[in-house]
Image (spheres, coloured by chain):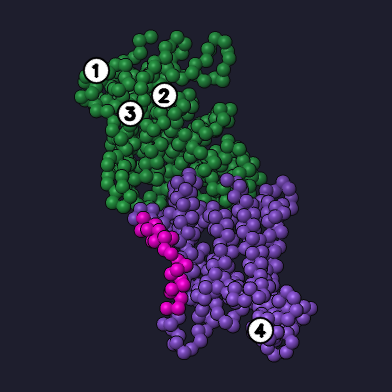
Amino acid sequence: MIRSRPSKDPTVPRTPAALAWQRLRADRTGMAAGVVVCAFFLLGLCAPLISAIYGKNPYTTYGQNEPGLLDEFGYPTGSMGGISGRFWLGLEPGLGRDVFTQLLYGIRTSLLISAVVVLIVTVLGTAVGLIAGYAGGWLDAGLGRIVDIALSFPSTLFIIAFVPVVQSLFVSADQQTPTWMRVTTLVVVLAAFGWAPVARLLRGQVVSLRTREFVEAARIGGASPIRIVRRELLPNLWTPILVSASLSVPVYVTTEAALSFLGAGIDEPTPDWGRMIHRGAEVYLSDITYMLIPGVAILIFVVAFNLLGDSVRDALSPSGR
Amino acid sequence: MNPLLEVSGLAKHFPVRRGAVLARRIGAVKAVDDVGFTVSRGESLGLVGESGCGKSTTGRLITRLLEPTAGTIRYDGQDIAHAGRRELMPLRGRIQMVFQDPYSSLNPRHTVGEIIAAPLASLGIGSRTGRRDRVLELLETVGLDAAHVHRYPHEFSGGQRQRIGVARALATEPELIVADEPVSALDVSIQAQIVNMLRRLQRELGIAMLFIAHDLAVVRQVSHRVAVMYLGRIVEIADRDTLYERSQHPYTQALLSAVPELDAGTGVGIGREVGRGAGRERIRLVGDVPSPLNPPSGCRFRTRCPKAAEVCAAQEPPLVPIGGGADGHLTACHFPALLPL
């Protein structure tokens, strides 16, 4: 049908998406944050390649295998947690594993979990928000109360208490919980609470859009409810959906790290930022480097991702409204 | 011949509820109450009244964006007052609407071509190429450039947007267009263009129109007949010249006298001619419009009417022809009269 074609010709108009991209390109903070975020994704994606070139992995206990790397108390010899040309970010106290590769593989764990959670939460929340907002009436009221309950639940406490219970259901006490199982449990419990704010946000947007005259025009034009949702409402909801998704990635990165730190998330030997900070907290009086490195990594990632989310919002929101 | 649209006893009451979970109904806003009129094929009926008098609600009931509380809406002989979405489908292309707000009536994420073709696509009319040709034809009809087809609404002015809205309403070749305050959101200079275009299209294409507005001058330009609403009721209905020259209802007279007048003698002005010409006196209405939650007993206008008497509170005046009036001139008043000049 009638579709706009992207064109270099200045007289031919740009699509709202092209305008948003243009604005994002002009936002230097946003672009810098975008570069940092992309770097994190790339590092995570290329972790096996980088560690192959680097010649180490996150599991081998170099410090224990080779004498001289750790002192008699198990702390890395040399200043700054054993940072050297060989171990770029030093060694883990005690086990003597390589910090740099742990950090690299930790990106994968964090980003994988947060990305999956954000995907589930966004799809589920959008669906619930659309249904509640467009249908209205008792369906809206019922879903609204469920959202209220999910929002008012002390989710962190619940997750800490709940994760071991679930895992004990599937794994007998004498066995090690498999990593995929820990990851799945984390994703499920985080998603179980995470959809509610998205649903609330989207419902509000839908309610305000529903009464706009272009929706009435579509109804008079004979459009079905599905067509109205798909063609009239959804294109106007990409902005809040994208903004909420991009702002919730860093939230889940920190939540996942917090849960791992508290022992309800990822555990040994899977590399993970939260678990590293957990170990770091045990040794920081003698060797602060091991806690500092994953902490700074999370800080940089979260700040960059939040700045990027803000820029995405700024770039999208004024378009054509 | 049967009229195209025949409305009788139409009512829309919006329930007012209090309480969050176990809401109690504490009353109803009687936005439209016992409204009846007809629109013939090719005829333009103007619907005027103050804001809140129920004229927009009436338009939304006829296009069945709202379901009436009571009454019938006969379209081409078929009662559509309580028809479901599927039953309405065959009629959707035949009744279209032009909206008040040219900003919120066009989806900001769609191109002009997509907007105008949307009713055709929803109703499955024509092939893709057929629809594209129709869109180009429509753009020309409403005075827009064919090159605008790939542009987005935010690139257009209010007047141009309203032209797009009109093109969308025309896409399915409707027999009836409900125009809900189509020019009140526009600059005065643009209003005349859009009004003239609507009048031209209405005449050339023979489309019946329900033209809802609060601006009497605008209504006079486009309507064959005019109905005046007050607080959910029609108080007077007549052909255009009768209503503007020889109105019988005190409310209509007050409305007409409130229209600013330009001195015809000086030759200054923009050609607005409303009311009974020079020498008329402004009728000042006192008080506010009563709440439609709890309208006055009897005649709804009595609280502000200079002629109100006891009978007005006791008895609701029916909408009837008044002796000596023109054909089809109906007035709902116990004391109808021409204004003493």
Residue pictured at 57% horizontal, 54% vertical: A239
Residue of label 1 = B309
Q: Amino acid at mark 3?
A: Pro
CA gap between label 1 and label 2 equals 29 Å
Give the mark toward the camera: 4 or 1. 4
Q: Say few, some or many: other residues with alpha carbon within 10 Å of mark 1 (under 14 / 14 to 19 / 20 or more).
A: few
- Specify the segment rendered in magenta: A141-165
Which label sits in the foreground, 4 or 3?
A: 4
| Residues indicated by labels 4 and 1 sit on the same polypeptide chain | no
Element on which disc 1 rests? loop
Left or right of A49? Residue B274 is left
Mark found first going from the N terminus, 1 or 3: 3
- Residue A73, disc: 4
Cα gap from disc 4 to disc 1, whole angstroms: 105 Å
Secondary-structure class at tag 3: loop
Chain letter for mark 4: A
| Chain identifier of the purple chain | A
Name the kind of residue labelled 1 in the image: Ala
Label the magenta part by its dominant secondary structure: helix
Which image quadrant for residue A98?
bottom right
Tell me residue A157's x, y (percent). 45, 68
| Numbered circle sitting on residue B290 | 3
